[in-house]
Amino acid sequence: ADTRWSTLLPIGPLLGSWGLWGKMHIEELIIDGFKSYSTRISVGPFDRQFNAITGLNGSGKSNILDSICFVLGISNLTQVRVGNLSELVYKQGQAGVTKASVTVVFNNADKNNSPVGYEMHDKITITRQIVIGGRNRYLLNSHNVQQNQIQNLFHSVSLNVNNPHFLIMQGRITKVINMKPQETLSMIEEAAGTRMYENKKAGALKTLEKKQNKVDEINRLLSEEITPTLEKLQKERANYMLWVSNNNEIERLQRFCVAFEYMQVKNRLENKNQQLEDLEESLKQIVEAIKALTARDKVVEKEIKDRTLSRDKARGSELKKLEDEHTKLSKDIASTESKLKNRQSELESEKEQRKQSSSSMGELRKQVEQKEKAYEKEKTKWDKLAEEEATTNKEIEKAQWSVQALTAGMSTQQAPEGAAEGGRSMREELLAAQTRLQGLEAEEKTKTMAITSFKDRIAAAEQ
């Protein structure tokens, strides 16, 4: 057999499980950007009972099976020979293709064996897309759906792509043939779809157990915490209702007391009205006496003012003279005090300026001494660098002369007389001279940069 050709046999069993007469089967497969298919390609129509794909090695036969498993929602990516979903995109997005899309079109002509809820559709189209970066979505008849909805659709027709025996790849046929009876029974149960329901049953039992634990916990809380709290609250409510009743009775009795006190005060007020009239009569008499006393008081005040005015006139002239002298002396004293304060403040400011001048002179002297020391130190370094620069220039001139001599065909090292191979060849000497010249030029640049740096530092020290 020609090893360049091979047959993708799993397509037959895969489509056979969906391709029995009278049941839903794959009609067309559309691949775009998936694995080795960079552009959109349509594969189909498929036969209802058996299909095989042949071609050269590396032509993408296995990728067609991988694309079908990809749409069916396989979770074990090792079955499709990748480590993560991004590897399913053509060249992992490095060729400009950043999205992989696979569409499977199922023929749903038999309505009796159709998935539940899709009897009105003649064709069911399922699309799965992934984008570089993690986006993953499913489309069912061009509508966005969740992954579990797609899995429920396949489970309704007894198809579980994550069944370990869903695919029997090359090299596993012998293993399947040599299975023990219990393993064969397990494989038949998974192929028939009963294992899927047993797994669901086990999951449901676990969920029931968890729910029962939660119910027991709730009952425990009811008996230990909530019921005692409710009883306590009921007692508090009864006490509160009793308090409300007593409070209402107290308010009713208080209203009776207020009404009784009001009637007593009203009777006393009527008795006091007569006393008030008597007091008003007495008040009128007192007011008339006060008016008479007020008139007499005014006459006395007028007499006092007249006598005070005559006395003030006699003393006014002498008092005014004393006040003028007092005002003049006060002004002189204030002027003298302000002048004294100004002189004292000027004296203090002069003393402070003298202290500041003395301290700043000392600091300036220290700075001058430090800059002179730095100048001497930098000047010594600069002299040393200048000598090194002169030496370097001489070596460069000597190397340039050597290069010129070598270029003219001369040799800077002559072999001794009578020796067969006493000196180097002209090319070797030229290469050595060029290497040395490059090293000297690099050293010259380094020295020049150091001299420039030292000059800047000397200028900064001089400032």
Image (cartoon, helix red, strand yellow):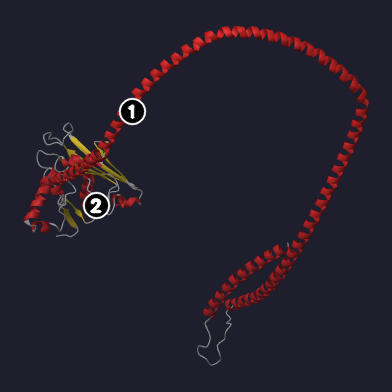
For the residues bearing labels 1 and 2, Cβ distance under 8 angstroms: no
x then y, percent, for residue 16? 12, 45
The answer to whether residue 47 shows anywhere in this view is no
188 or 102, nearer to the observer: 188
1 or 2: tag closer to the N-terminus: 2
Does dot 1 land on a helix, a strand or a loop? helix
Residue 43 figure quarter = top left
User: Tag 2's secondary structure?
Assistant: helix
Q: Return the residue at label 2.
A: 77
Q: Is residue 398 left or right of residue 167?
A: right
**Camera-side mark, 1 or 2:** 1
* Frontmost residue, 324 versus 104: 324
Note whether residue 355 is visible. Answer: yes
- Residue at 28%, 36% in the rendered image: 229
Nearest to the observer: residue 115 or residue 435: 115
x 16%, y 44%: residue: 205
Amino acid of disc 2: Leu
Q: Name the residue: 78% across, 61% down.
A: 361
**Disc number for residue 24:** none
Residue 180 in which image quadrant: bottom left
Q: CA distance from mark 1 to mark 2?
A: 68 Å
